[in-house]
Every structure is written in structure tokens, then in C-alpha cells.
Amino acid sequence: MADPIIIAVPKGRILEEAVPLLRAVGVEPEAAFSDEDSRALRFHTNRSDIDLIRVRAFDVATFVAHGAASLGIVGSDVLEEFAYSELYAPVDLGIGHCRLSVAEPAALAAADDPRGWSHIRVATKYPNLTRRHFEARGVGAECIKLNGAMELAPVLGLAPRIVDLVSSGRTLKENGLVEVEVIAQVTSRLVVNRAAFKTRPEVVPLVDAFRRAVEVRDAA
């Protein structure tokens, strides 16, 4: 019997939105999969040929790119940051909607105009994406890599601006920051390991099932 297909799913909000899609393609995770308090990382499903792993969003792309998982669900922000050539992203799942934005303290924003920037210093989880964005505008970007607590960077003098994901904007507001520029709109994509797509025949029908599930949902 062949090893089961592994689908990598990120923790948090995207996981909650991904479960209905998994069910729509006939994959029912075991109950512990949706329990954020569970420390398990690999989960069975109603299908003996499919298992799920639950990992950090940035790690989904790595697991799939290196073949440890055949498919995954990951934000377009992560795909743009890492640009793995081993990944194929055939379906925009239309979940995990947010935006990647530049934010700064409200007092700075009151007299600031992004169109006049020639050089900026930012704290971000996305140094590659951020640098490419500003280079395309002729702006030099000094990027300080942080993995969390981004909103502290301006307060503590690490960097006057941040580049981070924004959904409701509540976290920015509570930390005295405002958006001043949107770099990209973000949604989650189904990603596939290119080698698995060619060598594991069961992967292709699964990709097609995700595509149909999205089409049916969006047509409803």
C-alpha cells in the first residue's frame, strides 16, 4: 500500500476556513485537528490514503516544496516571500483574505507621504517581498527580520515602520499605528509539490476536487 498523501495546513484562522473546504472535497479530519490545544501535529482523516499535518504558515511551503507533504494550503504572501520553484499553485481557495501593508505611528503618518520616500527602514516577516516591492518603485528598503510582535518595533525605536498582514486593523489601532500603503492583497492557495503532481496519480483528482469545491462555493 502506498504511503498516504500528506496535506499541510497552517494553524490559526486559515485552518478554521480550510476545514469546510476539506469536507467539500470528501476529506473529514479527525476531531483533534480543529483543537488548537492539541499538541499533535499529524492527523488521520476518514480516508486512509490522506493524512493532514498542522504546521506554521511559513512552514507549509517548506514541507510541500521539499516533498514532505504533497499538497498544502498557504497564503500568497508566503509564496511571494519564498518563491519556491518546486511549488505549483493551481487553485486560489478564496480564504484567508487580508492584505500586506506598510504601517507607521499615527503621528508620523500625519505628515508623511509614501510617494516621497527614497529610503525606508522597516521591521517585517517578509524581507524579500518587501525589498522587491520597494526596489520596483526605486525606493531603498532596509528590512529588519522579525517573526512576531511587529507593532513593538516603532514604539521601541527598532524601525519607524512595519510591513505586516492586516485584516481588521484592530491590532494596529491598539498599538497606535495606521496603514499608509498596501503592498498586496492576500488569499490562501492550494499548493502542490511539482514532482508529486507528476508521479502520484492520486494528486491530480484531489486538485480537481478542490477546484470544483471552490467553484461550487463561489456560485452559491
Image (cartoon, grey):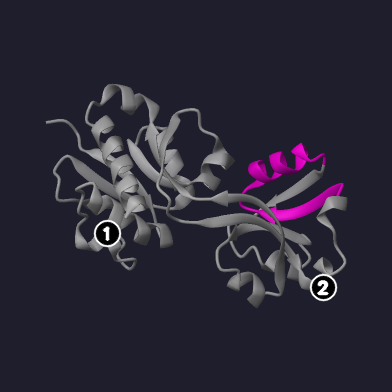
| 77 is higher (above) or lower (below) than 70 | below
Horizontal side of 61 relative to 109 (left or right) equals left
Q: In the picture provided, is 156 more to the left or to the right than 89?
A: right
Quarter of the picture holding the N terminus: top left
Quadrant of residue 174 within the rendered picture: bottom right
Q: Residue at x 31, y 49 (%)?
A: 53
Q: Is residue 88 above or below residue 218?
A: above
Q: Residue at x 17, y 39 (%)?
A: 49
Residue 150 position in % (x across, y down): 64, 63
Q: Position of residue 202 (x, y in %)?
A: 22, 31
* Residue placed under numbered mark 2 in the picture: 107
Q: Position of residue 204 (x, y in %)?
A: 28, 30
Residue at label 1? 33
In this view, the residue farthest toward the left is 1
Q: Amino acid at mark 1?
A: Phe
**How many residues crowd mark 2 within 10 Å: few (<14), some (14–19), many (20+)?**
few
